[in-house]
Amino acid sequence: MTGTHATEAPAVRRTLVMHGADAADTARRMLPGLPDDCFVPAGLDALGTAVGEGLAQIVLVSGVDEQAAIAGGVPALAAITADMDGGPALAAEVEAAGTPRRAYELWEAAGRLGPCGRELCRRTAGELERLAAEAAGSAESPVAAQVVLVDAKGERMVGMFGRMAR
């Protein structure tokens, strides 16, 4: 028809990107095709909102502090160290580290940042999906979680894990 144009429905937001305090710019650079309203500071309230809105995917781009808070703190980092063949001495050092940032430094100094960082991402993604399932009142998560660990400056990707969809 002359003079008329088909109108497209607005794109439905399907992804929420949560970012750590120092990782907002990095998250946007990693996912440049997403609109600004997809990016929010990391927090469990944002996860609950995403579940309530029926989103399909959660992406977390953050440093070790935010991920440790979700995964279980420094004790979880010590367990990851032991599970990733860091040895009992390094696991004990991580347990005594006091902060996730110090645990990260210990992993890095021992050459275990790669495997331990990836495992932290895996466990954080699992916990995000568990919390999403809980928020939805279901046995399975309605969202797929992807998690990216960035360095202390929030600039360089150190590890990642995730699912594209459920």
Image (cartoon, rainbow, N blue to C red):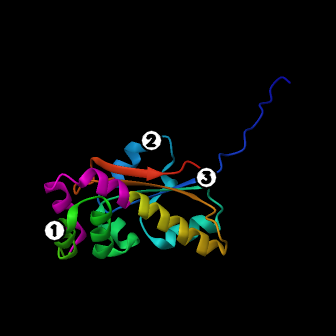
As displayed, is residue 55 above or below residue 131? above
Report if residue 137 is visible in the image: yes
- How far apart are labels 1 and 3 at the CA level? 44 Å
Front position among marks 1 and 3: 1
Location of mark 3 (residue) = 14
The residue lying furthest to the left in this view is 109
Amino acid carrying label 3: it is: Arg
Horizontal and vertical percent for residue 163?
A: 53, 51
The N terminus - image quarter: top right
Chain-order first, disc 1 or disc 2? 2
Magenta stretch, overall SS:
helix
- Give the quarter of the figure containing the C terminus: bottom right
Callout 1 amino acid: Ala
Residue 117, position as x, y percentages in the image: 31, 56
Residue beneath the point at 22% across and 57% down: 152
Is tag 2's residue or tag 3's residue first in the polypeptide sequence? 3
Q: Residue at x 80, y 26 (%)?
A: 3
Q: Residue at x 52, y 67 (%)?
A: 47
Q: Residues within 10 Å of mark 3 (few under 14, many from 20)?
A: some
- Where residue 155 appears, as percent x and y from the top left, is 27, 49
Q: Which residues fall within the magenta stretch?
A: 99-120
Q: Please tell me the numbered disc located at residue 89.
A: 1
Ranked by sequence position, the earlier of labels 1 and 3 is 3
Q: Is residue 41 visible?
A: no
